[in-house]
Image (tube, rainbow, N blue to C red):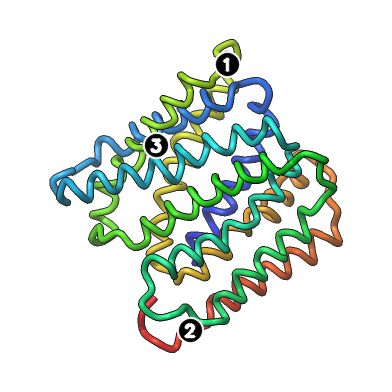
Amino acid sequence: MWILWAVTLLWAASFSLIGEFLAGQVDGYIAVFIRMVLAFLLFIPLWRPRRINLVKQCQLAAIGALQIGVMYLFLYHAFLYLSVPEVLLFTIFTPLYITLLDELLYQRRRLPLRWWLATAIAVVGAAIIRFDDLSDSFWYGFLLIQAANLCFAAGQVFYKRLELGDERNQLHLFALFFFGATLVTGLAMLSFANFQLVPQQPLQWFILAWLGLVASGLGYWAWNIAAKRVNVAQLATMNNMLIPAGLLINYLFWQQAVVWPRLIIGAAVLAFAVWLASSPRPTPSN
């Protein structure tokens, strides 16, 4: 679990950098493609494709394409129809999708009721923090965000259940994950990017290097590694811990306004959900 907490803090800080230095200045599709290329290059020296068969290599590349590439494609399209608060609000359903997909696709027995309860509580806690007024025509954007949530959730579940050997073996294979992500984000960039908004300032390139090598490269690797260590309810509930962590980072470093009662109550509810998800399962299988 400590890896999920560490990556949550890392991503919270990274989202803050995006909001302060890249949003509106660098096209999102270009930024994501650069991040995926850098992450791919980070793992290329470690790549040992002979460690698994060709079918699993293709599956791992497809997981990266889905979890990051297709997810970002839906996410950025949603910004055409939604405000930023609405986008953040509608991402809170990811824990439900993780739990649902895992049970439908992989579980021979039904998941424990307390895991479902923990997942639902995580959604409620995030809603307490993020709920705001909605625009009159938000449904199309809502559906796009749910498609993005499903892609991100499915990628996590598929990686958790894909047999890749021990963690050292996964390290030597993870370039394939970013290979798939790079292909999809590259196609998305060519199709939708505004090439007038390319990174130009040294600070922007430095932040993209950080996001690509650390937040994306090491971050996604560590998150997916941790996904195999925890149960599905822990993985699901931790997906929403990014919301209070991100708000807290924004306040500490950029003095952005925070509605403290909602943040404290929502974070407490989320923490309870994570605790409930960490209760031992009555059977040895995770």
Looking at the image, which residue is at 48% across and 20% down?
A: 191
Q: Which residue is mark 2?
A: 280
User: First in sequence: mark 1 or mark 3?
Assistant: 3
Q: Are marks 1 and 3 in contact (CB under 8 Å)?
A: no
Q: Which residue is mark 1?
A: 194
The residue type indicated by label 1 comes to Asn
Nearer mark to the viewer, of 1 and 2: 1
The residue type indicated by label 3 comes to Ala
Categorize mark 3 by other alpha carbons within 10 Å: few (<14), some (14-19), many (20+).
Answer: many
Q: CA distance from mark 1 to mark 2?
A: 49 Å
Task: Using the image as rendered, state which of residue 272 and residue 5 is in the foreground.
Answer: 272
Which secondary structure lies at badge 3?
A: helix
User: First in sequence: mark 1 or mark 2?
Assistant: 1
Q: Is residue 29 left or right of residue 12?
A: left
Say which mark, if any, is on residue 9. none
Q: Is residue 178 left or right of residue 233?
A: left
The furthest residue to the top: 196
Q: Is residue 21 left or right of residue 131?
A: left
Q: Is residue 228 above or below residue 23?
A: below
Q: Is residue 103 above or below residue 215?
A: below
Could you tell me residue 3's position as x and y percent? 48, 60
Could you tell me residue 207's position as x and y percent? 56, 29
The residue type indicated by label 2 comes to Pro
Q: Which residue is mark 3?
A: 181
Could you tell me residue 200's position as x and y percent? 57, 13
User: Which quadrant would residue 161 be assigned to in this image?
Assistant: bottom left
Q: Quadrant of the C terminus?
A: bottom left
Q: Is residue 19 left or right of residue 235?
A: right
Which secondary structure lies at badge 2?
A: loop
